[in-house]
Amino acid sequence: MKNLILEKIVTLFLYIMVGFAFFLLFRGHNRPGGGFIAGIIASAGFLLYGIVFGSEKVLEKLRTNPRYIIGSGLLISFIATILPMMFGNPPLTGMWFDVAGLYLGSPLLFDIGVFVLVFGVIVSIFTNIMDVLKWNS
Amino acid sequence: MENADLFLKNAALIALYIFSLSLIFPFFRLFKGPTLPDRIVALDQIGVIIIGMMICDVLYAREKLLLDVVLVVAFILAFGSMIIARYLYKQKKEQ
């Protein structure tokens, strides 16, 4: 069954959700927000997209296997963990750098890793469930 | 200025009471509802009333951060009921 209005609105909604997730991701650590919530909101956008279009379209949109997304999230968090050890600090110490006027730190890198990890886990779970239950429209 | 602030706070508080009273009717329909579409419409109505209560709380407590929660809940609520309705339609056509 094709529904033109639902398809167009869900495509628009996907971009709004991912943009809002990035907003929450960069607002985290000082105010409400952070990697976990941003990952859940971005994957909710992809979940609605998958319910309307089917799980193959979600995998086409991501252009990669969700397993690689999980692995890259773990790698980014690992880099944020061992980065302070190279400067002689204990692991997971917060380090802050002044990059082109922006005050960025290693907690932001850790949050980005958590975001990518949670996003990959939820997308892989729901695409597998939709494949097993044959929920593809 | 302070007078207007007090008026807004009291209006938000009264609206909050009325919203919480009006939450009874959709819950009644949710538990009694003879068919599945009745229950889905009742759930949607509960969500809309809760969004209204959150906005009243934003006005009362001056906490702007809850507006983000309102945004996400409204999006997911609208699309959730739309998609459940789509599956009900599909199920009815298959029978």
Image (spheres, rainbow, N blue to C red):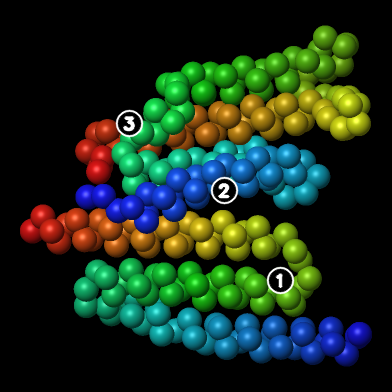
Quick check: can you spot residue A125? no
Query: What amino acid is at disc 2?
Result: Ile
Residue behind mark 3: A56
Q: Is residue A32 above or below residue A50?
A: below
Q: Chain of mark 2?
A: A
Residue behind mark 2: A16
- Where is residue B88? Give x, y as percent: 23, 60
Q: Is residue B93 left or right of residue A104?
A: left
Q: Chain of mark 3?
A: A
Looking at the image, which is closer to me, A8 or A58? Answer: A8
Q: Are marks 1 and 3 in contact (CB under 8 Å)?
A: no
Query: What amino acid is at disc 1?
Result: Val
Residue behind mark 1: B58
Q: Is residue B86 above or below residue B26?
A: above
Looking at the image, which is closer to me, B47 or A101? Answer: A101
Pick whichever of labels 2 and 3 is earlier in the sequence: 2
Q: Chain of mark 1?
A: B
Q: Tag 3: Cα neighbours inside 10 Å, few (<14), some, or many (≥20)?
A: some
